[in-house]
Amino acid sequence: MGMIIRVNFNNQRWAGKCKNADSDRRLYKCQKKLMKTGFKVDKKGNCLANCWESTLCTKFFWGNEKGNYDSERAKGKVFFIFADKDGSRVLFAKSRVKKVEDDKLFFEKFRPMEQEKWIEGLLLKELLGKKWGEGTYRYIDEKNIENKLKEIISSRKEYFDDPIETEIIDIEGRQSLKKHLIKERSIKLINAFKNSLKSFDCMICGFNFEQTYGKLGANFIEAHHTKPLSLLKKGVLISTKDLVALCSNCHRMLHRSSPPSDWRKLLEKDNDLRSKN
């Protein structure tokens, strides 16, 4: 059985006390004292409070004010989320339960993903089937909620890798056999789409890899699917008309929201910026 743990935002990557805490809008829960963190700042705006968020990625444990954890249920993968400014949740890290000691839950060493890899716009009611309510954690059924989270992550797997612990030294290159089910894009379809292109310019910003990188960038472009993989029903047919040629930056920006943003809206914003300049 896995877990979702709801923490407050920490602008020091959950490894120190927040800086400029009085002006960082993502710390609104602390600023409005919606959470019992003992929020207080010095003259420079740096936080003076002692909270679990400031040591989550150094001591790798989380406490439970409501009582002890259920050691039979607190096992497996842990997904860490925080509330964004718009009330949606952001999945920023994952780890595994290492051990349970009374009111503390210890994790395997981990660190947050880079911000561009966070999975934003999550609605907890869609994942849990109900509002979160009180408390900082939820046990999740592996066959239901955890699979939903895995599907969201796997649909954007190039943007959400497993956490890397820089101090770990290990042997690379071991061979292992893994069996799992994932939804895969059609390589045949993508190749046909790229072969049909007359221009390899990004449809949003106009960037051309060959113009910047020479022969190395010749005929290089990424194919964006306008129909999100996570929303496709089994057996739905996709054609090359459902693909759009984008550079890596624009492609990644579209996938920062869930589901991905409409590429036409990003094109409109880019055109507005060009007209102003």
Image (spheres, rainbow, N blue to C red):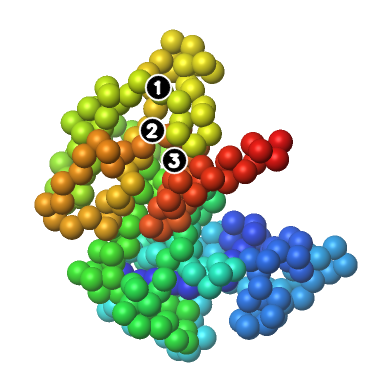
Label 2 SS: strand
Residue where numbered disc 2 is placed: 245
CB of mark 2 within 8 Å of CB of mark 1? yes
Quarter holding the N terminus? bottom left
Q: Describe the element under mark 3 as helix, strand or loop.
A: helix
Q: Residues within 10 Å of mark 2 (few under 14, many from 20)?
A: many
Q: Is residue 83 above or below residue 209?
A: below
Above or below, 250 relative to 42: above
Tell me residue 145's x, y (percent): 28, 70
User: Which quadrant of the view contains residue 177?
Assistant: top left
Would you call the spot at circle 1 few (<14 residues within 10 Å), some (14-19), or many (20 or more)?
few
Residue with the mark numbered 1: 199
- Front-most of 87 and 153? 87
Q: Which residue is mark 3?
A: 251
Q: Is residue 144 left or right of residue 134?
A: left
Q: CA distance from mark 2 to mark 1?
A: 9 Å
Q: Amino acid at mark 2?
A: Ala
